[in-house]
Image (cartoon, rainbow, N blue to C red):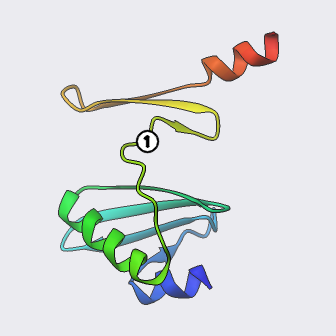
């Protein structure tokens, strides 16, 4: 069902991971990572990302939680000034050790 809705919006499903969808529009890429009922979106254009959100929200009720800070127990830190993203499982490792 979600697969059909996303393909109608011009998305392709990655063969290596069927929870990963991508779309290119006017040279800009949008990537959706789907895990059960959660979705993480990234892309090269804020305007394109917003258009995609609106289109998906027309079909499925979305809750936009803003920039991602955590995903599957992975801490996400984005430094836009340095064009850097760091991922950490420090909290998860600490919980295992405790």
The quarter of the image holding the N terminus is bottom right
Q: Position of residue 38 (x, y in %)?
A: 58, 57
**Res 18 → quadrant:** bottom right
**Res 36 → quadrant:** bottom right
Foreground pick, 81 / 16: 81
Residue at the image point whose x is 35% and y is 63% from the top:
30
Q: Position of residue 64 (x, y in %)?
A: 41, 56
Assign a secondary structure to mark 1: loop
The quarter of the image holding the C terminus is top right
* Residue 77 against residue 41 in the figure, above or below: above
Foreground pick, 81 / 91: 91
Q: Position of residue 13 (x, y in %)?
A: 54, 74
Q: Residues within 10 Å of mark 1 (few under 14, many from 20)?
A: some
On screen, residue 93 versus residue 62, left or right, reads: right
* Residue 72 against residue 44 in the figure, above or below: above
Disc count in the image?
Answer: 1
On screen, residue 4 versus residue 97, left or right, reads: left
On screen, residue 29 versus residue 97, left or right, reads: left
**Res 81 → quadrant:** top left
Residue under numbered circle 1: 68
Q: Position of residue 3 (x, y in %)?
A: 58, 81
* Residue 84 against residue 57 in the figure, above or below: above
Residue at the image point whose x is 48% and y is 77% from the top:
12
Residue at the image point whose x is 26% and y is 65% from the top:
50
On screen, residue 9 versus residue 6, left or right, reads: left
Residue at the image point whose x is 61% and y is 70% from the top:
15
């Amino acid at each position: 069902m979600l697969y059909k809705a996303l393909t109608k919006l011009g998305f392709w499903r990655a063969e290596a991971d069927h929870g990963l969808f991508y779309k290119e529009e006017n040279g800009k890429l949008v990537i959706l990572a789907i895990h059960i009922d959660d979705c993480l979106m990234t892309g090269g254009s804020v305007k394109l990302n917003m258009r995609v959100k609106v289109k998906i929200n027309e079909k499925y009720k979305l809750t936009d939680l803003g920039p991602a800070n955590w995903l599957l127990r992975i801490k996400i830190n984005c430094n836009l000034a340095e064009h850097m993203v760091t991922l950490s499982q420090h909290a998860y490792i600490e919980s295992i050790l405790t």
